[in-house]
Image (cartoon, rainbow, N blue to C red):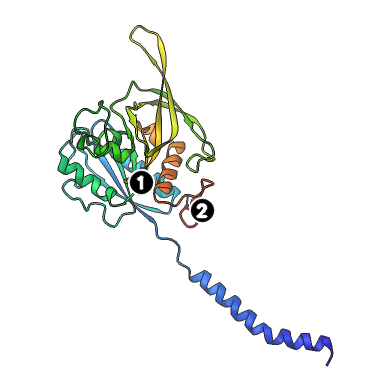
Amino acid sequence: MTTQRVLSELNMKLLPVILFTSIGLFSASAQEPSPKPIKILLITGGCCHDYAKQKDILKEGIEKRLNADVTQVHTDDKSTKPPLSIYGNPDYAKGFDLVIHDECAAGISEEAVIEGVLKPHREGIPGVNLHCGMHCYRIGSAGEPATFDTPHGWWFEYLGLQSSGHGPQEPISITHVSKSDSLSKGLPDWTTLKEELYNNIKMFDTAKPVTIGRQTVKNKDGSQKEVEYVTAWTNLYKGKTRVFSNTIGHNNDTVSDDRYLDFVSRGVLWATDHLNEDGTAKAGYAKPASDK
């Protein structure tokens, strides 16, 4: 038997095996389910902001960019004690992968209520906090530096940074601390329209700054000064829970800016551990370009 004939017969025997294997691999790939959407609970309402519009800007902006499903908990109440349905229900985040706190509830100081808001995060559900979310749930003086494991420090410990107030609405220059950070890679530095720059009373050791904001403000005597504070950071709460916060976002023009929504969406990916080191979403979590 010639060598050519031996090879021909061998190929004929191997062909069914190759075809079967190829079909099997194709079938497995075709049947592999796409990842489930990130289930997000977005909480909005309370004092001082246009939450009626911002809740929809955020929902649409995040769902446009990510494989995510945003559920809204909202109240039109404009007080510092908005009657949000999560209060008194420590299991409010059950079934969700992430909670976005964008409420403005600076007047709520009852320890039992605040413990209920924190319970899901203490148990490991990640958080993203936007703008006035930093000024909620205060027990005691917000300007007095907080310490771990005290009621005064509960909310600040969760956030990773303590803020007590802000200056005037003027443009803020946003700079990324490290261009190699997965939260910053490929994203531009930029300058907002009129916005509020939140002060920094204390940053906890568990937190890491991501962006810095610089703002030029006028003194009472007419002179000017430049104010600089951390505007976005990450925190590891209770040694396990990922928390991302961004103090920018007072006005609708800022919240609807693509640069803002891109950054917040990046924070959602980081908090839920769906962000690659190069700043891209892990497989299945970025919305296909055709869907945008």
Label 1 to label 2: alpha-carbon separation: 19 Å
Towards the viewer: 116 or 104:
116
Which one is closest to the eye, mark 1 or mark 2? 1
User: Can you give x and y, in whole percent of width and height, for residue 106 in the image?
Assistant: 22, 33
- Residue corresponding to mark 2: 290
Question: What amino acid type is highlighted by mark number 2?
Answer: Ser
Farthest top residue?
Answer: 221
Element at label 1: helix
User: On the picture, is 278 further left or further right than 246?
Assistant: right
Residue 256 is at least partly visible in this image: no
In the figure, 12 relative to 191: above or below?
below
Q: Secondary structure at mark 2?
A: helix
* Residue 289 at x, y percent in the picture: 52, 51
Q: Is residue 284 visible?
A: yes
Counting from the top left corner in percent of width and height, residue 13 is at 69, 87
Circles 1 and 2, Cβ within 8 Å, touching? The answer is no
Q: Which part of the image, by quadrant, shows the N terminus?
A: bottom right
- Which of 97/256 is in front? 97
| Residue plotted at (63% across, 80% down) | 19
- Residue at far bottom of view: 1
Residue drawn at (26%, 52%) of the image = 93
Say which amino acid is labelled 1.
Lys
Would you identify the image quadrant in which residue 8 lies?
bottom right
Q: Which label belongs to residue 59?
A: 1
Horizontal relation, residue 26 to residue 252: left or right: right
Pointer 1 or 2: first along the chain:
1
Q: Is residue 22 left or right of residue 235?
A: right
Q: Nearer the viewer, residue 116 or 38?
A: 116
Q: What residue is at 37 percent from the left and 39 percent from the top?
A: 206
Query: Mark 1 packing: few (<14 Cα in 10 Å), some, or many (20+)?
Result: some
